[in-house]
Image (cartoon, rainbow, N blue to C red):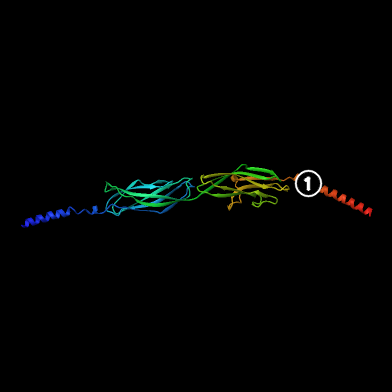
Amino acid sequence: MSRLSLIMTFLVISVSFNSYIPSAEAQVEPEIILTCEDSTNMSVDGKQKTAYIFCEVENPTVHVITVQITVQGGVLSTVAPNDFTVNRGSSWTFSVTYGGDIDTRSGEHESRIDAVITKVNSVNYIGNPESYNVIINVNEYIDCQYELEHQLLVVNAGAPIVISSRIDCHANNEFTKEFQILMIDRDSESGSLPTGFSYKQKNCLIESNPDENIVSEKCRFEISTPIYLLRTLDSCIIIVEIGDENSDECYESLSMEIKVKTRMWLVLSTFIIITIGIWNFQDRLKEFLENRNIDD
């Protein structure tokens, strides 16, 4: 075989082998790595009512990859970027915004974040999604407000003080709350009842319904007053949750003025009657003793 034939044969074999060797890019399969924060907290009783999860998509390959993001948030609303491009050997950080409302139940809410490759080097591509499961912890809240039917109540000594109030509670979970009335003396700023006064109906229990977020309860409270009161009592009534430390102030918008008027005329007339009775008794006793001495 001539030298020229050998060279031609070698070139043909070389070209044949080279045609079966793929490029370096073709040898690396498109791939992404998705990582996210595991959990976050959300409060739904304020103005914001949102929470955020931050994620990163890493592209360890030599391809330029377009990634599409989808989020399953359950009862929570979600906002996330639709798609973005990650250059070869780099990463992309994004956030998912979760939203709730005042009725969103407290506790753990699961969410799944999916990232899928849709294009490789600007060519459409069908890939399997990378998923990451996260937890959104919705904080519990209970907000209770009350209204007093009267801003001023005047009663006479001996008459009961009857307080009616509607207490409205808004919560995102089941709850039990107990409220009580306190009578605060304006002069001494003391929460102890004056002598002769006593609570006949002091507490009111409110329990939620599993199917409702708002509970309204009509509460009735009662304080007995003494018949004999030497001075008019100027006090206020407040409603507080049992265990509340701030229970010794009369807030103007959340308290009721109470005036218990003394019945001095009744006191004086009773004193006069008792005095006259004692005098009559003394006169009769004296007369009885004198008659007995005469008989002896």
Residue 38 percent across, percent down from the top left:
41, 54
Residue under pointer 1: 270
Residue 204 falls left or right of residue 34:
right
Direction top: furthest residue: 149
Tell me which amino acid carries mark 1: Thr
What is the x, y in percent for residue 268? 77, 46
Instruction: Check the picture and name the quadrant holding the C terminus.
Output: bottom right
In this picture, residue 137 sits left or right of residue 131: right
Would you call the spot at circle 1 few (<14 residues within 10 Å), some (14-19), or many (20 or more)? Answer: few
Instruction: In this rendered view, identify the residue nearer to me: 152 or 95.
Output: 95
Percent x, y of residue 70: 36, 47
Residue 218 higher or lower than 37, as above or below: above
Q: Quadrant of residue 150?
A: top right
Q: Nearer the viewer, residue 172 or 249?
A: 172
Q: Is residue 215 left or right of residue 116?
A: right
Front residue of this view, candidates 92 and 257: 92
**Left or right: 156, with 295 as reference point:** left
Per the image, label 1 sits on a secondary structure element best described as helix
Q: Quadrant of the N terminus?
A: bottom left
Q: Residue furthest front?
A: 210
Query: How many numbered callouts?
Result: 1
- Where is residue 245? Give x, y as percent: 58, 53
